[in-house]
Amino acid sequence: MLKRLSVFLLVGAWSLCSLFAFDTVREALPSLSESQHARLASGKIIDGESIDGESLSQFFVAGSESAYRAELAQGMEDGFSIAAVSYIPYGPKLKAMDDSERQLAIFNKIRAISTQEGLTYISWRAGNKPKVLIEKSSYMQDDRNLNNLLPDPVATTFPRTVQSYVFQRDSSFGGNRYRHEYTNSDKEIFVAIKNISSMKVFGIFTAVPKENLSINMGTYLLEEGVLLTALISIEGRDPEVSVLGYKVDLPSAFTRRITALQNWFVAQLATIETE
């Protein structure tokens, strides 16, 4: 009986500490509803779309680079945007680091894009079952040369800005080239990703012209954990593209990609704890 009581008190104390820790999330994202905060606290991803008339700024910390990009996306007249956020508590190793150590560790994990190879997502075409999304993922020496792919870089100091070129081949849009531009601060890591080649369906029909896709991923340090945010914007395209009678729901397709990438990042953070 005493042992059961001790376990009950320990679990209760842990839950109470978790609730207090989550107060920092509420302060960082005050415009979210109680149900949205509850989903975040349970480890879920919450998202919204500009085509629904929903404000995107509520998903980002005020004053952050991510929030600024969300405001720009909200004002886009021709196209649509999708925003998402999740909350990941620190493990013991990350928690023991100071902010500068933590930022460098997270930055290197975000840039380890070769680990995205084999990443799966829930595919509508596969009957809402897991399917490999990213088949190849590597850095490029420049924005064109695919004959000289590079290994993941590892930084020894935390940079404020950096630009890289990336090649990825995925199961939906084939092989594409991207530009990654980082804008970092003491609390935030923000990467703006642009497609520098047209994204095609069946390797023939253009679904998203070059430079028209913006994928923005960010992390923001809080006291007990990190916020992981995503913002995808597509210019000059209706939400649905029809090719030879085959319909591509772009918001759904990219929301599934956000989920896959955020799950990848959670796994990346977990490797820090085991290194």
Image (cartoon, helix red, strand yellow):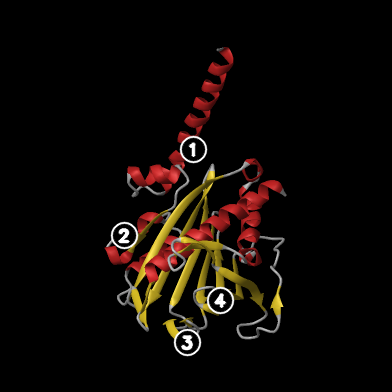
Q: Residues within 10 Å of mark 2 (few under 14, many from 20)?
A: some
Labels 2 and 3 touching (C-beta < 8 A): no
Which numbered marker is on residue 213? none
Q: How far apart, in angstroms, are the residues tagged by discs 2 and 3?
A: 35 Å
Marks 3 and 1: which is nearer the front? Answer: 3
Q: Residue at x 56, y 22 (%)?
A: 7
Label 1 secondary element: helix
The answer to whether any part of residue 236 appears in the image is no
Depth check: 111 or 248 in front? 248
For the residue marked with disc 4, what is the amino acid?
Arg
Percent across and percent down for residue 134 are 57, 69
Residue that label 3 marks: 204
Labels 3 and 1 touching (C-beta < 8 A): no
Q: Earlier in the sequence, mark 2 or mark 4?
A: 2
Q: Earlier in the sequence, mark 4 or mark 1?
A: 1
| Residue 224 as seen in the image, left or right of residue 29 | right
Which numbered marker is on residue 55? 2
**Res 256 → quadrant:** bottom left
Q: How far apart, in angstroms, are the residues tagged by discs 2 and 1?
A: 26 Å
Label 3 secondary element: loop
Q: Residue at x 57, y 58 (%)?
A: 264
Label 2 secondary element: loop
Q: Earlier in the sequence, mark 2 or mark 1?
A: 1
Q: How far apart, in angstroms, are the residues tagged by discs 3 and 4?
A: 22 Å
